[in-house]
Image (tube, rainbow, N blue to C red):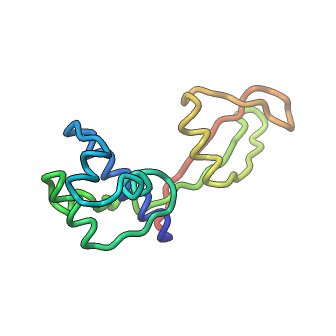
């Protein structure tokens, strides 16, 4: 797993824990003496590196353990994605970014039109693999 993914996953956990206690980004920034833009960058999907000490300070401000901000083992697995036609069995591997987008934006029952048989029988399949 690359650095960007690790920092982004930690940022998601920080955001989740902050929202759980009803704290705003501005309140977290004040409590930690970091800038609002720094906190916003950590929580967004923009790559923002930070030190272990910073993570410790954020955990303290959220009244949680630093361990609560470390992604679980399941997070360290990436998914591979394929579009598979249930009619003619045509399948194609797709980039993880597109697979994640389809997974997040469309319902599980969403079907796409197959470029080979022209039927609306193509669905997204994903499988976890170890990083």
Q: Is residue 62 left or right of residue 110?
A: left
- Seen as rendered, the residue at the extreme left is 63
**Residue 31, located in which quarter of the rendered image?**
bottom left
Q: Is residue 31 left or right of residue 86?
A: left
Q: Is residue 79 left or right of residue 122?
A: left
Give residue 87's position: percent from left, percent from top: 75, 32
Give residue 58's position: percent from left, percent from top: 23, 59
Q: Nearer the viewer, residue 118 or 107?
A: 107
Give residue 63's position: percent from left, percent from top: 13, 52
Q: From where the camera sits, is residue 74 visible?
A: no
Q: From where the camera sits, is residue 81 visible?
A: yes
Residue pictured at 50% horizontal, 59% vertical: 78
Q: Nearer the viewer, residue 123 or 35?
A: 35
Residue pictured at 72% horizontal, 31% vertical: 112
Vertical arrangement, residue 57 with respect to residue 91, above or below = below
Residue pictured at 37% horizontal, 55% vertical: 11
Give residue 42's position: percent from left, percent from top: 40, 57
Q: Nearer the viewer, residue 84 or 56?
A: 56
Q: How many marks?
A: 0
Q: Nearer the viewer, residue 64 or 41?
A: 41
Residue pictured at 42% horizontal, 65% vertical: 6
**Residue 73, located in which quarter of the rendered image?**
bottom left
């Amino acid at each position: 797993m690359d650095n960007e993914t690790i920092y982004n996953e930690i940022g998601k956990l920080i955001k989740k824990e902050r929202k759980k206690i009803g704290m705003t980004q501005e309140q977290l920034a004040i409590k930690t003496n970091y800038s609002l833009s720094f906190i916003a960058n950590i929580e967004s999907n923009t790559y923002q590196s930070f030190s272990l000490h910073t993570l410790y300070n954020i955990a303290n401000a959220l009244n949680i353990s630093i361990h609560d901000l470390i992604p679980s083992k399941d997070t360290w697995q990436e998914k591979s994605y394929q579009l598979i036609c249930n009619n003619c069995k045509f399948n194609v591997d797709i980039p993880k970014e597109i697979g994640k987008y389809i997974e997040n934006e469309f319902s599980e029952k969403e079907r796409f039109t197959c470029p080979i048989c022209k039927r609306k029988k193509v669905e997204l399949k994903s499988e976890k693999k170890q990083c």
